[in-house]
C-alpha cells in the first residue's frame, strides 16, 4: 500500500514533460497534428489546453466553449475566453440550448438523468463535428479519479480520441495546474460538471477528492487491503462500489458471441 502524497516539484516537472511528449508522439503516430477540446472554465480542461499547446503549438489547437445559457456560470465562460486569448488558440462559443430543445419533444419524457447526460453528449457531437470537418483529434479532459469512479457520461465527456490527463488523479491535476502557472481562480475552483443547477462533483459523489484519491491510488490492491490500513470503511466501500459499477464505462461494449 502506498500513501498518496502531494507531488514534489521534480515529480510535477516529469509529469508535465511526459504528458507533452506523450501527446505529441500520439498525434504523430496518427498522422494528425491538430486537436480540438471542449473548454469549460474548469481546471481539467484548462490543464488539457496547456498541455496541448505545449505539445502541438497554439496554431494547431482549437477550443470549443459550449455553455448552456442560464446554467453555465458566466465566470466559467469568461475564464475560458481568457485562457484562449492568453494561449492564442482558435476558439468558438456555441450555446447548446437550442440543440437540447428537440430532445424534449421525444414521445417519452426524458428523466433528469437523461437530460443531464444529453448535455454532455451534445457537446461530444459538436466536438466530433468539428474534428471530422477539420481533420483534428478530439482531446479528452477526464482525470483518473473521474475515470475510475465512473463520474462522467458515456459517449459524452468520456468520448475522445485520447485522454490527455487520464493518468492523473484529481489532486495531481490541481497540483500540476498550479505548477505550470494556470490562474489560481481556475486551479482553486470547486469542480462541477454544470449539468444541473448548483451541482458540484464532490457533493454528487459524497466525498472530497483529496480523500477519495487516497483510495484510488491503491485501487489495484483491492478493497480489503485498503480497509486493512485504516482508511475509513464508508469511504473505501463507496469508492469500490462506484469503481465496480462503472467498469462498463472503461471498456468497449461487449460483443455477443456466436
Image (cartoon, helix red, strand yellow):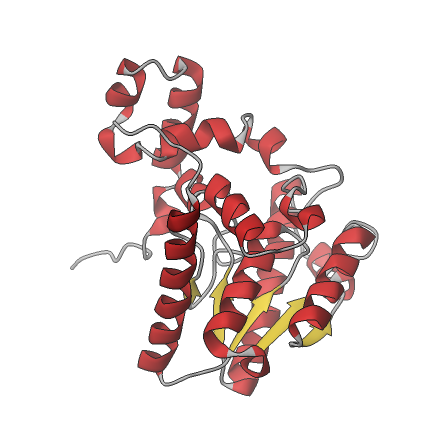
Image position of 15 (left or right of 47): left
User: In the rendering, at what x and y percent does residue 235 appear?
Assistant: 44, 20
How many badges with numbers are in the image? 0
Q: Residue furthest left?
A: 258
Between 225 and 68, which is closer to the camera in this rendering? 225
| Quarter-of-image position of residue 163 | bottom left
Q: Nearer the viewer, residue 150 or 29?
A: 29
Q: Which residue occupies 46% across, 73% down?
A: 55
Front in this rendered view, residue 105 or 93: 93
Residue 98 image position (x, y, % from top left): 78, 65
State the image quarter where residue 17 is shown: bottom left
Q: Is residue 183 above or below residue 98?
A: above
In which quarter of the view is residue 50 placed? Answer: bottom right
Give left or right: position of 97 versus 210: right
At 42% from the left and 55% from the top, the residue drawn is 13
Can residue 40 be seen? Answer: yes
Estimate the x, y position of residue 15 in percent, counting from the top left: 39, 54
| Residue at the front extreme of this rendering | 10
Question: Which percent across, then down, holds residue 197?
Answer: 76, 40
In the picture, the quarter occupied by the N terminus is: top left
The correct choice, above or below, for 187 with respect to 134 in the image is: above
In this rendering, would 67 be left or right of 29?
A: right
Q: Residue at x 28, y 29 (%)?
A: 2
Residue 95 is left or right of residue 171, and the answer is: right
Looking at the rendered image, the quarter that the C terminus falls into is bottom left
Residue 66 in view: no
Vertical comparison of 161 with 215: above or below? below
Amino acid at each position: 500500500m502506498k500513501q498518496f502524497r502531494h507531488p514534489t516539484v521534480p515529480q510535477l516537472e516529469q509529469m508535465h514533460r511526459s504528458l507533452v511528449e506523450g501527446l505529441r508522439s500520439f498525434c504523430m503516430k496518427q498522422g494528425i497534428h491538430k486537436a480540438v477540446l471542449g473548454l469549460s472554465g474548469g481546471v481539467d480542461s484548462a490543464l488539457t489546453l496547456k498541455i496541448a499547446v505545449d505539445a502541438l503549438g497554439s496554431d494547431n489547437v482549437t477550443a470549443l466553449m459550449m455553455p448552456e445559457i442560464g446554467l453555465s456560470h458566466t465566470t466559467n465562460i469568461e475564464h475560458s475566453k481568457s485562457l484562449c486569448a492568453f494561449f492564442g488558440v482558435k476558439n468558438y462559443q456555441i450555446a447548446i440550448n437550442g440543440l437540447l430543445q428537440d430532445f424534449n419533444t421525444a414521445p417519452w419524457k426524458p428523466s433528469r438523468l437523461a437530460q443531464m447526460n444529453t448535455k454532455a453528449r451534445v457537446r461530444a457531437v459538436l466536438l466530433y463535428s468539428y474534428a471530422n470537418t477539420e481533420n483534428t483529434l478530439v482531446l479528452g479532459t477526464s482525470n483518473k479519479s473521474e475515470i475510475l469512479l465512473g463520474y462522467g457520461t458515456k459517449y459524452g465527456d468520456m468520448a475522445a480520441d485520447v485522454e490527455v490527463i487520464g493518468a492523473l488523479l484529481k489532486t495531481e491535476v490541481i497540483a500540476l495546474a498550479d505548477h505550470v502557472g494556470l490562474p489560481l481562480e481556475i486551479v482553486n475552483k470547486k469542480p462541477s460538471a454544470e449539468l444541473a443547477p448548483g451541482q458540484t462533483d464532490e457533493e454528487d459523489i459524497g466525498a472530497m477528492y483529496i480523500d477519495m484519491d487516497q483510495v484510488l491510488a491503491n485501487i489495484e490492491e483491492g478493497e480489503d487491503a485498503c480497509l486493512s490500513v485504516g482508511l475509513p470503511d464508508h469511504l473505501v466501500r463507496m469508492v469500490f462500489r462506484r469503481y465496480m459499477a462503472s467498469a462498463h464505462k472503461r471498456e468497449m461494449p461487449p460483443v455477443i458471441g456466436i
